[in-house]
Amino acid sequence: MGKAVRNDLHGLEISHKELQTLTNLPVKDELIIIINPFKKIVKDILEKIKGSEGATVVFLSFSTVVFGYVLFDIFIKIFATWITIPSWLLLIFLLIWGGSFTQIFLYYWWKKRLKTLKSHMTHSLQILLQDVDRYNAVIKAIDINDQIEEAGNPEVRIQKREKVIEALQLTRSDLVRALKTERILRENKSFILRNTELFVNNLATLTAMQVTEQATEHGRLLNEAFQIALDVQSEMKKLQSQEGVEGIGG
């Protein structure tokens, strides 16, 4: 989001890190390219050079490079006297070799995490991740709209902003709750399949409570729980069917 994001948008976005914590899976995992941090450092240095402290930045950057090379050269001359090639050439070779090895390791580690994600991905989780993307996109759109307004376009101001933010907060809570529920069901699938009667009994209890409390606020919450229970029971039947087919196939 923008650098000057408004306070009421802080904490609303569901970040990749939070998503991984909620699902206990490497969702939205991206391959780390080791050259990117160096590109960012060079870019920051070039931007600072254009400023009033340009000469200082150039001096510090050059001094850091030279000091690092001098330390490496001294180390080679003391502990690796058998090396005959110039130390600067050796340093370049080691940097290229080390960078290549690290990048290959990061690639295979990333592929392994993708494989883990694919093996644990459920239809429900896939839908929830799409919902999170749409939710985050709405927040991004609001942030961009705020920046356009602050640039001198008051006509784009969001009407009833408080209600919009409140709705987003409720949506966020729903998404977090759904992600936690999906993780519990996914990580306890085998237990649930062995104890389906427990969930059937809970469903019957929820049904009875829903009938008597329909008109109350508590009844509204129970109705939501009832709908969730119905979805859970439906998913359990699907899982049982899959287990039965696998058992016959085995």
Image: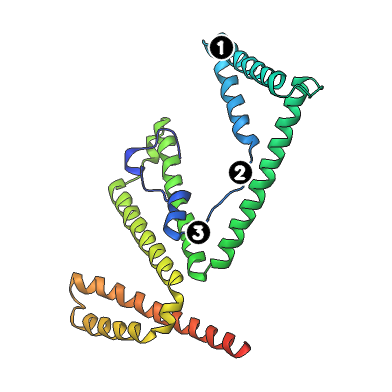
Label 2 neighbourhood size at 10 Å, few (<14), some (14-19), many (20+)?
few
Give percent across and percent down for residue 214: 21, 78
Badge 2 is on which residue? 32
Total labels drawn? 3
The quarter of the displayed image where residue 206 is located: bottom left
The furthest residue to the right: 84
Tell me the residue at 33%/51% (across/down): 164
Q: Amino acid at mark 1?
A: Gly
- Of residues 26 and 105, the one nearer the viewer is 105
Give percent across and percent down for residue 66: 65, 15
> Is residue 71 positioned above or below 194 on the image?
above
Q: Label 1, label 2: how many angstroms apart (C-alpha)?
A: 31 Å
The quarter of the displayed image where residue 236 is located: bottom left
Q: Which image quarter is the N terminus in? A: top left
Q: Amino acid at mark 2?
A: Ile
Q: Nearer the viewer, mark 1 or mark 3?
A: 3
Give percent across and percent down for residue 107: 66, 49
Q: Label 1, label 3: how many angstroms apart (C-alpha)?
A: 45 Å
User: What label sits on residue 164 in the rendered view?
Assistant: none
Q: Amino acid at mark 3?
A: Leu
Badge 1 is on which residue? 54
Q: Are marks 2 and 3 in contact (CB under 8 Å)?
A: no
User: Colour scheme of this structure image?
Assistant: rainbow
User: What label sits on residue 25 in the rendered view?
Assistant: 3
Tell me the residue at 66%/47% (across/down): 105
- Of residues 36 and 227, the one nearer the viewer is 36
Relative to 144, 6 lies left or right: left
Query: Of callouts 1 and 3, which one flags the residue occurring earlier in the amino acid sequence?
Result: 3
Q: Are marks 1 and 3 in contact (CB under 8 Å)?
A: no
Query: Of callouts 2 and 3, which one flags the residue occurring earlier in the amino acid sequence?
Result: 3
